[in-house]
Image: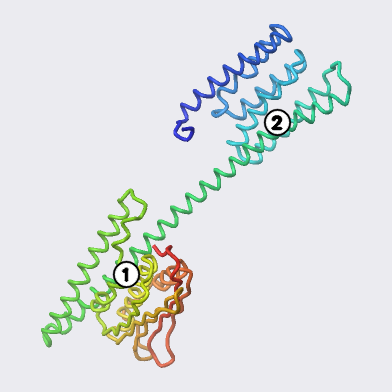
Amino acid sequence: MARRLRDGQWHGVDTVAAVFLALGFGASETRSGGWGAGAVAAVVWLPVAVRRRRPVRVLYTVLAGAVFAMAFTGWEESWVPVGVALYSVAVREPPRRSAAALGCSLGAVAAAMALVPRPVPASGVAWGVVFASLMMTLPWLVGTALREQRSYAELAARQAVTDERLRIARELHDVVAHHLTVIAVRAEVACAVASTNPQEAERTLALVGTAGRTALTEMRRMLGVLRSPGDGAELGSAPGLADLPVLADGAGPRVELSVDPDPPLPPGVELAVYRIVQEALTNVVRHAGSADCRVNLSRVGPEAVEIEVVNDAPPRLPSRRPGSGHGLIGMRERAAMCGGTLSAGPLPTGGFRVHARLRCGSETAW
């Protein structure tokens, strides 16, 4: 219920609390020290009503009133509202300003209690100073801890937003880069063979249409997930191992696909496997043209799965399309999110090999 209160409602709560405390302490001091002492005690508590809006000003106002009360009315418990004001300062002000306020408050209260003559022994005054200092420091420590907790919570929230943006960027890159690369390369092939081999051009254009429709389907799925207020339950429609044959058929080059289906993988790991294979095939289309490609997916015990994508491009084959390097980075990030590793590089005999090993117990791939 406290978390549901708005700032204006909290200000109302502070006002009511300050009025009740002023009346209570004022009445108590009136009985023991007269009307003057009661009026001072009441006035010292009233600034607490705006402690959330002006915590530093409220502190020094209350502190001045507390010192005045100690000096002229003998109100020994005047440090209590100072502790309340110190809590507000600790919660809402930076550490350096908060620590300075604590030091100033402790010094002023200690000086007032020690210098004002009272009919008590010196040892009693010393213990009173120590007790008041502890009672003022305690709410300051609680406020400081609460401020640090809020700071960490805000940092975690910002990190979550950053992670979400990276996740979206990674998904967009995988979907758009793969399908648009296939569409661009296949369209060029269709144009090149349209006059000499109409059947090949027709087959290639069919691949272009399939890639376009698949890209639209995945983009709609992603937009649906982003617009949904749920907690990710809609991710069951994400691509997985069952979609690898369609991915291989629509990639363009001849792909030899070998998948070990048992035991099944967790959904998050399936998505990571699919995206790694997709990006590897995108690189084959972009850099190796129509070179043959082999995709092997095998289980390594119950806790790991290995992915190997190898193409047979000849040595020193020039790149068909310039790349930004984000593809390899994205594959490594996906492998790391599944508690695994990924290596990629050219083969001595020509071609390129991507090898990844993922843990099957991780569900953080999305």
Residue beneath the point at 37% across and 61% down: 169
The residue that mark 2 highlights is 136
Quadrant position of the C terminus in the picture: bottom left
Number of residue marks: 2
**Relative to residue 39, is residue 117 drawn left or right?**
right
- Name which residue type carries label 2: Met
Q: Which mark is residue 240?
A: 1
Residue lying furthest bottom in this view? Answer: 349
In the rendered structure, which disc, 2 or 1, sits on the residue that comes first in sequence? 2
Seen in the picture, residue 298 relative to 180 is either above or below; the reply is below
Position in image of residue 11 (x %, y %): 50, 25
Residue beneath the point at 26% across and 85% down: 254
- Circle 1 sits in a helix, a strand or a loop, which is it? loop
In three-dimensional space, the C-alpha distance between marks 2 and 1, rounded to whole angstroms, equals 60 Å
Q: Which mark is residue 157?
A: none
**Relative to residue 57, is residue 137 drawn left or right?**
right
Quarter where residue 193 is shown: bottom left
Quarter where residue 146 is shown: top right
Residue beneath the point at 38% across and 67% down: 266
Residue beneath the point at 72% across and 21% down: 77
Position in image of residue 224 (x %, y %): 28, 55
Position in image of residue 176 (x %, y %): 29, 67
